[in-house]
Amino acid sequence: MTTQNPRIATAADVARLLRPVVVGGDILAYSYVRELHRAFGIERTVVLATQDIKMLSSSRFTDYRLEPRIHEPEGLYEALERLAAEQRAAQPGCVLLVLGCDDCHARMLSAGKQRLETAGYTVPYIDFPLLDDITQKRRFYDLCDELDIPYPRTWYFDCGEDGPAELPAGDFPYPLIAKPSNSAQFQDAADTVEGWRKIYEIESPEELAQVWRSIRASKYAGELVLQDFIPGGDDAIRTLTTFSDAAGDVRVVAGGVVCLQDHDPTALGNPLCIMGEREEAIIDCAKRFLAHVGYCGFANFDIKYDKRDGSFRFFEVNTRCGRNTYYMSLGGQNFAELIVREFVLGEPIAYREAYDPYLYCCVPRYVLDRSMENRARLQQALEALRRTPEPYPLHYAPDSFMHNLWARVMHANQIRKFKRFYWDTDGKQLK
C-alpha cells in the first residue's frame, strides 16, 4: 500500500515548494541538479553522499551533506527521515522528492518506498517485487524469450552453497563475458571478491576458473551469468532510455550509439560518449517489454549490435536513470522535468522521441581521436560535437566558478584514465 503525499498544483509553484533530495555523488547526481534548475529554477537540491565530491559540494545549486551510511538500507532510511523532518519543520507545505544515482539506491528506495512515503517523500521507482524480478538477469532473459527480444547465448551458475565447486571451463567459447545476475547485490559484496570487476572479459578457461574461485569465496550468493561475447568495439553498443506513465505506456524515448565507454574496471560499461541515433527495432522491443510488465518511470536498456546476424541483442534493464540520462535532455527533452510532471504535478505527458542531433561527451576530443577505431564514426561524432551546445553534463555556465573548475579537472583527468586503462593495455581490460 502506498501513501498519497501532497502534489504541487502548478509548475509555477515547483521552485517554491519542491525539495529534491539526490542520493549519490556521480555525474547523474549533478545532472539532476542542473536539469531541475534549468527546468524549474530550483536553486537548491539536497545531495547526500559518503565523501566530498568537489564538483558537487562546490555547486551553488546544491545543499551538500555527508552521510556515511547511505549505502546500507537502514542508514539511508534514517538519513532521509531526519532530512524530511528538518525540511517540513522549516516549510510545512513543502513536497519532498527522492532520487537515486546507482542500482543499489534504486533497489533500496524501491524496497523502502512505503516507509519513505510515510515520511513524506515522493518515490519515483517501481514497486520492489517488480524491480527485484526484472533485474535478475535470468528472469529478464526469460521475458525476452517470451517477447521475442534477442539476447546473447547465456549460461547460469549458482554462486551459493548449492553451486558447483568448479565450472566446466573447457566447454565454453572464448572470449566470454561473465557478470553477476544481480548487479546491486554483487556491488554490495565487492569488498569480499578478490579482483572485483563490474563485468569480466574472460579470455581462457584458466581465467574463468580463477574468477569463479574468487566469487565463490565471497559473500555474493546470487548467480553468475556467462555470455557469448558479441564481436565489435564500443561503437557496437547501443543505449536506450525510456519514460513510461502510470498506465505503463512509454511517453518519451531517447537513445544512441555508445561511441566510447569507460574502461576503468570499476566503471566498465558506463558510456562516456553517446551519439544520438534512432533504431526502430530497439524501440519496439523496449516498448513490448515495458508494456508487458506494466512499468512506470525511467528505464535504461543496454544493447549491442551483433553484426553476425544484424540483430540488436539486449543485455539488461536498469530500473532508474542511467549515469548518462542527460543525453535525453540533449535530444530535446529535459529528463528531470519528466519525473516532476508525472510524479509531483500529475500532468499528462505527450509522446515524443528525443532525437535532436547531439553528442553527449564526458571526455576531451583528444581521447575520442585516440580511442575510436571506427574513423567514420569518429567523424560523425566530431560533427555532432560541433553542433551540441552543452555536450558535457558537468559544465553549466550558471553554476559557480569552483564547480566548473572541478568539472574541467574531471574532464581533463579522462586522458590519464584512458592511458592507464585503455591505451597502455592495447584496449584489453586491465586485470
Image (spheres, rainbow, N blue to C red):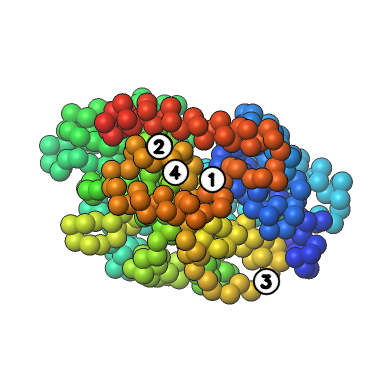
Q: Position of residue 40 (x, y in %)?
A: 72, 58
Instruction: Nearest to the eye among marks 2 and 3: give it.
Output: 2
Q: Amino acid at mark 2?
A: Val
Within the image, what quadrant is residue 127 found in?
Answer: bottom right
- Asked whether residue 132 appears in the rendered view, the answer is no
Q: Residues within 10 Å of mark 4 (few under 14, many from 20)?
A: some
Left or right of 191 on screen, residue 12: right
Q: Which residue is mark 4?
A: 272
- Front-most of residues 141 and 10: 10
Q: Position of residue 8 (x, y in %)?
A: 77, 64
The residue at the point 31 percent across, 26 percent down is: 424
The residue at the point 68 percent across, 69 percent down is: 346
Instruction: Nearest to the eye among marks 4 and 3: give it.
Output: 4
Q: Amino acid at mark 1?
A: Tyr
Q: Position of residue 210 (x, y in %)?
A: 25, 27
**Mark sitting earlier along the chain (3/1):** 3
Q: Which residue is mark 1?
A: 392
**Mark sitting earlier along the chain (1/4):** 4
- Asked whether residue 342 appears in the rendered view, the answer is yes
Q: Amino acid at mark 4?
A: Leu
**Mark sitting earlier along the chain (2/1):** 2
Q: Position of residue 343 (x, y in %)?
A: 66, 63
- Front-most of residues 40 and 381: 381
Contact between marks 4 and 2 (CB within 8 A): the answer is no
Q: Which residue is mark 2?
A: 367
Instruction: Nearest to the eye among marks 3 and 1: give it.
Output: 1
